[in-house]
Image: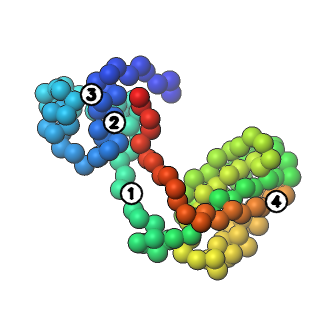
Amino acid sequence: MAAEPLDPTDRRILQVLQDDARITMTELADRVGLSPTPCTRRVKRLEETGIIRRYATLLDPTAVGLPVNVFVSISLTAQTEPALQAVEEAVSTYPEVMECYLMTGDADYLLRVVVPDLETYQRFVMEKLTRLPGIANIRSSFALRQVAYRTALPLG
């Protein structure tokens, strides 16, 4: 879907919602300089056009027992459409996979995986990743510390 142009008011609405999705419509309208009814209409349009995909609650991974963050590079034996589709369908079902990107360069896929410990990660690799068809190579890089993490897109 092609994104329709956003005017400055839409951008202000999106910035405020990225910072606090639980803000009331009255507070949002006040912050962006609209009355509640036009603000509500704009938010509804942004939702209907897919610019706002969904609302989420961000959790502290360590607080919920998932302190290990692993970046996994996967290379395939062949980059055919069926091979790519099989990997994508499988990893989409793995709750440990937080993000998955089809890449250019040395690896075909880059995954971000969260797990409670190294033993769980080992099981994940052995019981899930190595069983995917067409896997040529799996490389893991463990995050030592998170330096920056953002969920808000830079709207300018």
How far is the residue under mark 2 from the one under mark 3? 13 Å
For residue 137, the mark is: 4
Label pair 2/3, CB-CB below 8 angstroms: no
Q: CA distance from mark 1 to mark 2?
A: 16 Å
Type of amino acid under label 2: Gln
Residue drawn at x 72%, y 55% is: 73
Mark 3 packing: few (<14 Cα in 10 Å), some, or many (20+)? some
- Earlier residue among tags 2 and 3: 2
What residue would you read off at disc 3? 42
Give the mark toward the camera: 2 or 4. Answer: 2
Q: Nearer the viewer, residue 123 or 117?
A: 117
Q: Amino acid at mark 3?
A: Arg
- The quadrant of the image that shows the C terminus is top left
Structural distance between the alpha carbons of marks 4 and 1: 32 Å
Residue type, numbered disc 4: Asn
Q: What residue did someone put label 1 on?
A: 58
Q: Are marks 3 and 1 in contact (CB under 8 Å)?
A: no
Specify the amino acid type for callout 1: Leu
Label 1 or label 2, whichever comes before in sequence order:
2
How many residues crowd around disc 2 within 10 Å: few (fewer than 14), some, or many (20 or more)? some
Instruction: Report which quarter residue 9 is drawn in.
Output: top left
Q: Quadrant of residue 69?
A: bottom right
Q: Gap in Å between the C-alphas at discs 2 and 4?
A: 40 Å
- Sequence-wise, the earlier of marks 4 and 1 is 1
Q: What residue sits right under mark 2 in the picture? A: 15
Q: Residue at x 69, y 59 (%)?
A: 72
- Report the colour scheme: rainbow
